[in-house]
Amino acid sequence: MKSDQIDELELFQEAFFIQEVGNEAIKNALENNKKKKIASVFSREGIIYYKLPSGVITQKSPFK
């Protein structure tokens, strides 16, 4: 039984690490988009939004 608990703990730690890496990647992408004056795209509850370099959030795509 103890080996099952260790496996669950290792799995939890690995999942937490993967989430941290993903969050850091998102943060970097958002910063790069802002520097390059590119809109960032995200969705919430299945709706797509665009955050423009000015900080305005809209549902209208700024891309051609």
Image (cartoon, rainbow, N blue to C red):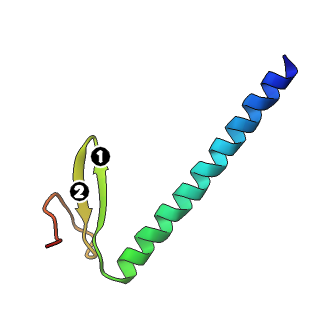
Q: Residue at x 29, y 76 (%)?
A: 38
Residue type pointed to by label 1: Arg
Q: Is residue 54 above or below residue 21?
A: below
Q: Is residue 20 left or right of residue 59?
A: right
Q: Residue at x 68, y 37 (%)?
A: 12
**Image quarter (top left, top right, bottom left or bottom right) of the C terminus:** bottom left
Q: Residue at x 44, y 69 (%)?
A: 29
Task: Give the SS element for disc 1.
Answer: strand
Residue 8, x across and y down, in percent: 73, 29
Single out the residue that lies furthest toward the top. 1
Residue 53, x across and y down, in percent: 28, 76
Which of the pair 40/56 is nearer the observer? 40
Residue type pointed to by label 2: Tyr
Marks 2/1: CA–CA distance: 8 Å
Residue at numbered disc 1 = 44
Residue 21, x across and y down, in percent: 59, 57
Quick one: label 1, few (<14), some, or many (20+) residues within 10 Å? few
Task: Give the SS element for disc 2.
Answer: strand
> Residue 49 got which mark?
2
Tags 2 and 1 in contact by the CB under 8 Å rule? yes
Residue 36 image-quadrant placement: bottom left
Q: Residue at x 77, y 30 (%)?
A: 7
Q: Is residue 64 left or right of residue 20?
A: left
Q: Is residue 1 left or right of residue 11?
A: right
Q: Earlier in the sequence, mark 2 or mark 1?
A: 1
